[in-house]
Structure formats: C-alpha cells, structure tokens
Image (cartoon, rainbow, N blue to C red):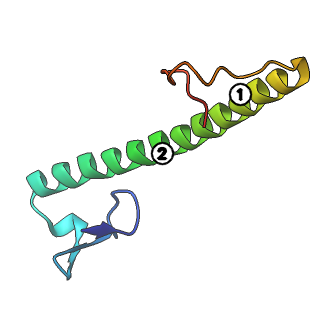
Amino acid sequence: MTTTAAPQANLKVNINDRDYDYAELPQKAQLVLRDMMRIDQRIGELQFELRHLQAARQLYGSGVRQAIQEEGVHDNDSEPAGNGHLD
C-alpha cells in the first residue's frame, strides 16, 4: 500500500496494485489508513533519531580513542573484552 499525501479529499491510495480514491473508501478503511500513515511518520522520526544517536556514539568513541592515545594508555590484552567495546 502506498499513499501520495496526508488524508484529504483528492488523496489516491494504492492497495495491492489498485488505485482508490481515499474519500470513497469505507470509513473504517480511512481510519486504518490514517493510523498507518501516523505509524509511517513515527517510524521515519525514529529512524532519523537513530541515525543521529549512532553518529553521536561514533563521535564519542573517537573521543575516547583519541584521549587514550594522547595519554599514552596501553591496552590490556590479557583481559577479555566486555560491554565497553568501542567500534
């Protein structure tokens, strides 16, 4: 299913490769489609936030690695890696 815009009188929707006028759909179908559009919008917002959080995590990881290099701290190969693994 794809939509071309937010719910409005001239909205066209494509369901199973068939085009429909949104306004001509049963009210229940309209309600479900509005909910689906809200969900799609929220997914987009969360994906946007996730990309920013991943970028921030990479930046912090770089900062930690740089601080370790600047201070000349040596790694300890004898201890197993834990939850603090920075990649």
The residue indicated by pointer 2 is: 47
Residue at (56%, 28%) from the top-left corner?
Answer: 85
Q: Which of 83 and 3 lies nearest the eye of the viewer?
A: 83
SS class of the residue under badge 2? helix
Tags 1 and 2 touching, CB below 8 Å:
no
Q: Label for residue 60? A: 1
Residue at (51%, 25%) from the top-left corner?
Answer: 81
Measure how far apart labels 1 and 2 are at the Cα level: 20 Å
Q: Give the label, 1 or 2, closer to the camera.
A: 1
Would residue 40 appear left or right of 26 to someone viewing this image?
right
Classed neighbour count for the residue bearing mark 1: other residues with Cα under 10 Å, few (<14), some (14–19), many (≥20) = few
Image-quadrant location for residue 72: top right
Q: Which of 69 and 58 lies nearest the eye of the viewer?
A: 69
Instruction: Indicate whether 23 appears above or below 30.
Output: below
Amino acid type, residue under disc 2 in the picture: Gln
Q: Which of 27 and 41 lies nearest the eye of the viewer?
A: 41
Residue 84 pos. (x, y %): 55, 21
Q: Quadrant of the C terminus?
A: top right
Image-quadrant location for residue 75: top right
